[in-house]
Image (cartoon, rainbow, N blue to C red):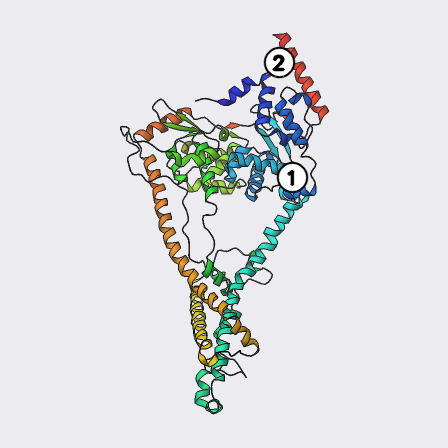
Amino acid sequence: MHDTSKDIGCNMRHGNISRPIAAATAGIFLFNLQTVTAFAPVPQSFVLHNPRAAAAVRGALSLSSSSFADEIRQPLPSPKVVQAVESLQRSGDNGKGGVIASDVAAAAGIGLSEARKELTTLASLSLGDIAVSSESAELIYKFPNDLNQALSENSNKFKLRDVWSKQIWPKLFYVIRISFGVALLLSIFAIFSTIALISSSSSSDDDRRDDRRGSGMGVGFGGNPFGFGGIFGPSPFDFFYYRPYYGYYGQPYYMRRREDPEEMGFLESTFSYIFGDGNPNGDLETRRLRAAAAEIRKSGGVVTAEQLAPFVDPPQLTYDLDDVNDASLVDESYVLPIVSKLGGEPDVTDDGDILYKFSDLQLSATTSSADALEAVGLPLSASSGDIKRFLDSNGINTRGSLEKRDLLNLLIKQVQDESDSFDDTFAVEESEYTFSVAGDGQKFFAAALGVVNLGGALYLGNILSSPALAGVTLPGYYGVVQSLFPGLLAYAILYNLIPALRFAWINNQNSQIKERNKNRRKWITLVRSSTGRIARKLKVAKKFSSSIRRVDKEGTLYDTRQSFSDESLRRESDALNDFDEILKN
């Protein structure tokens, strides 16, 4: 399998520039050199022999001074990238470790190119430091410990987004949600109070004095127009005022964890009944890339399309892919999105099979213990007790392992033993849609009141269109209801129509989701039970696999924390050492 990084290193050797310097120069140019130069001056000799790199330096320096307009146009880092960087930094070197693009891509579930762009933006906004590894020429990003605080201090745009997403939008969206319940109650009140007025006004004076006819409608403008509170007992609308659905004292609703559907108030459940609760698979792409990156690293950086199938939307298994003698054309285009985003390269074996190599993903600045914790789903900040409980639950003997270091070594060994097997791989499945997370009682009331509202609107429309009210304008507030009646009718129809259409759409979507999930599980079974073509591909892929290469965060060729004089002294010292080595030889 061909390694293009060697060609780059060979082609970059010029005159007095040694191989490590040339490789670093290539790495800097390929991995966005202008990012480095935006934070500290780069020694002229570092880019003198590469005009294209020098042009990148000049372009980067022009970005170092930004106006207010530039700050408005500057992109902001993704919240999931910020979270991934904070977790990675906490996990290494006692909270002072740097991060590289491949680790961020694997942790955040994004593509490699996107990770590099996000880290560039993040370093620019947080005034972080960037170093160039002397061995791999990989850019190592180092950020302040309190990254969110640093971003808020250096970027008004980030601070505004943080305030909007954490303080303003949750409250505003809560008001929007309950407004649909308020609108339903107001619509019912407007419709039935107008019906009560028209019905009472149509009666004669003698009829109004007749107790039997007066009690028939149960309305009267001296009291409750709906007739509740009398022989019918307490108003059912008391339900909306007495139940403490909206939160606890001192703890607003929008700050609570949404776990128990019964915690949702009726007013808010109306919105849930009409529009649902969002897409449960909004993070599907992130979960796919994160799982694929973990599988690739576990497999040594070389995988087959069948290994990646459980993380994408593979085709239906209409023929035997495992049959060595099957001459059918194999289409592996379904893995191309993951391959392109994670920097994979296809390679054809002597048997005509296609393997995918991910060299960049095999670079990591994290420790083996961090990789092991991530592989088993434990947080990077897991305590000794958490690790011990996990090992005990999996039947691993922890006797004599008292220190966290000893427990981590056991965990690392366990992960390495399982890395050769596909048995612990699970498909990234889609979650099915739910009609509403509101409680059954709340959904019943939301639906029942919607039907009542629609029935009242149709009845009021029949009354208003009668010949007796032709050309008649109702007085005061009721005249406003009369003028707004088309809107009230449209609201009543849509209130019932939207949930009905959404119910049918959800059933159709869920049936498709079940089929896709079932198909992904079939691919896992196929790989696990393979004895033919797929087994042959896996065997060859294992031969080309390699362990993760650790990036030395201390052995750096250049660091933005170094001044020009420090860099010059270091380079002079290195040159003298090289000259001494030449004299010795």
Q: Quadrant of the N terminus?
A: top left
Quick one: 391 or 283, which is closer to the camera?
Answer: 283
Residue that sits furthest to the front in the current view: 471
Q: CA distance from mark 1 to mark 2?
A: 38 Å
| Residue type, label 1 | Ser
Which numbered disc, 1 or 2, marks the residue that appears first in the sequence? 2
Determine the residue located farthest toward the left in the rendered image: 325
Q: What amino acid type is highlighted by mark number 2?
A: Gly
Residue 193, position as x, y percentages in the image: 50, 77
Query: Where does the C terminus fall, quadrant-wise?
Result: top right
The label number, if any, that marks residue 573 in the structure image:
none
**Residue 398, percent across and down?**
46, 37
Q: Nearer the viewer, residue 501 or 401?
A: 501
Dividing the picture into quarters, in which one does residue 127 lie? top right
Q: Secondary structure at mark 2?
A: loop
Q: Disc 1 on helix, strand or loop?
A: helix
Crowd around label 1: few <14 · some 14–19 · many ≥20 (10 Å) = many
Disc assigned to residue 15: 2
Q: Position of residue 478 (x, y in %)?
A: 54, 76
User: Residue at image x 55%, y 33%?
Assistant: 101
Residue pointed to by mark 1: 126
